[in-house]
Image: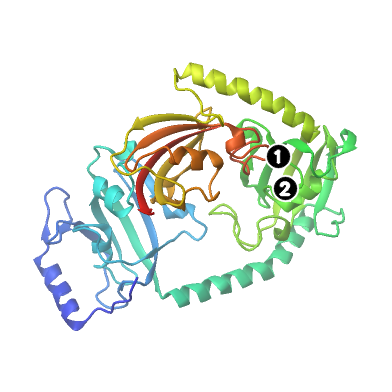
Amino acid sequence: MRKQHLSFVTMFLVGLFFISACNTGKYPGFKTTKNGLPYKFYVKNDTGLVPENGKLLGLKMTYGTADTIFFNTSATQDGLITLPMSESVYPGDIFEGLALMHLGDSAAFMVNADSFYLKTVQAQEVPDFVKGIGDLKFNIKLHKIQTQDEAMLEYQEKLDALQKEEADVLNTYLTSNNITIKPTESGLYFESVKPGSGPLAKNGDLVNVHFAIKLLNGTEIFSSEAAGDPVVFELGQPFDTEGMNQALRMMKAGGSAHLIMPSNLAFGEKGRANLIPPFTPLICDVKLIKIQDKAQYNQSKSGDESAIIREYVSANNITVKPTASGLYYIEQVKGSGAKAKAGDKVKVWYTGKLFDGTVFDASSNRNQAFEFTLGEGRVIKGWDEGIAMMNAGGKATLIIPSNLAYGDRGSGQRIPPYSPLVFEVELQEIVTK
């Protein structure tokens, strides 16, 4: 986004903007801009920095209804959300409200829910939980206004401080908990809780594992037992944390262990989303339930998958026949545009699900269609085959066996090995041919 500086004329117009605002009866105590945006200031400065286009805004923010908060920045690591300032997308949007503010201001804005999700968030459709609610109430405090360079410098300084603090934080934890075990050469603290039996797990084995990850203060980040099923993955392939991979190679089937991992064996300088800050040591409790030879596992799971697909097809009254590769293509809406073919650059909206209905990925999470070149192997084989059967504007359901998806490796924690997948896809357009 280009940078814009408010000129004297713009400031003058903003002044007129405030003068012309009037009280609205719908929301007592609120005023309304010329474009119909209801607003109310809790704290208002008449001087100071203003949100210029292209600047990064650090906001404390909640939005929701009178009864329910849909979003609250208090759940983020530093209690703020960073938002690039932009021109209004439509009259009466949240950016119009932000443009009224100065640094340090706090205010409330009433924004039409449908317009916010469809035009600002650019969702494909209005989420069910906001349909019919009318307006969303945004409570916003403007904490920071920065350039991109200023924000990057601040972030790097924060990273440097966290990195320097990690050793002290870890040592304090070890001392206060009377932990005297010595770390491995890599820095992993490994404490066997139950020894297990049989051979040690080795790279290439399929391991069946329950694990829980916590911060040093005891806050649980993830638990496979709480999620339901143990996790199965090939030891030696990238999975979750390097610290757990190292620990499993020190364990036998039926064993369990308590781990303390420095950040270089966990999520390093990136952390993980808003759950784990950068340079954060972690606690991990691991149970190695079973070790399987990969060849035997592959043979058994291949047979299981065929039965699972037949059962799913029957239960959902699917009558189409699979293609020679095993793909089920169920056309929902026939597109009116050209048929996609290898070499075309296409835009696709999609939702990917496991057979139990669990959604593991959706383009709507990123508010944009997925763009790729068809037939170049940049997506799973089931996609290259299925999208090539569609016309632009069409919608279809793809049932994809694992040999056309992620096979015997699966994909991280989301997709276990030998998982057939269901994709709801819409070929939005063929961009180039």
**Foreground of the two, 376 or 349:** 376
Relative side of 91 to 313, left or right? left
**Foreground of the two, 244 or 29:** 244
Rendered image: mark on residue 143: none
| 237 to 140, vertically: above or below | above
Q: How is the image coloured?
A: rainbow
Q: Amino acid at mark 1?
A: Phe
Q: Residue furthest bottom?
A: 8
| 36 to 12, vertically: above or below | above
Circles 1, 2 touching at the beta carbon (< 8 Å)? yes
Q: Quadrant of residue 104?
A: bottom left
**Which quarter shows the N terminus?**
bottom left
| 292 to 75, vertically: above or below | above
Q: Position of residue 235 (x, y in %)?
A: 76, 43
Q: Residue drawn at (41%, 76%), measured in percent from left and top?
A: 147
**Foreground of the two, 15 or 337:** 337
Count of marks overlaid on the render: 2
The residue that label 1 is drawn on is 233
Relative side of 51 to 282, left or right? left
Q: Is residue 227 visible?
A: no
The residue that label 2 is drawn on is 237
Q: Position of residue 422 (x, y in %)?
A: 49, 32
Relative side of 225 to 260, left or right? left
**Foreground of the two, 356 or 23:** 356
Q: Is residue 165 visible?
A: yes
Relative side of 174 to 23, left or right? right
Measure the C-alpha gap from mark 1 to mark 2.
8 Å
Q: Position of residue 84 (x, y in %)?
A: 37, 66
Q: Residue drawn at (44%, 41%), measured in percent from left and top?
A: 388
Q: Amino acid at mark 2?
A: Gln
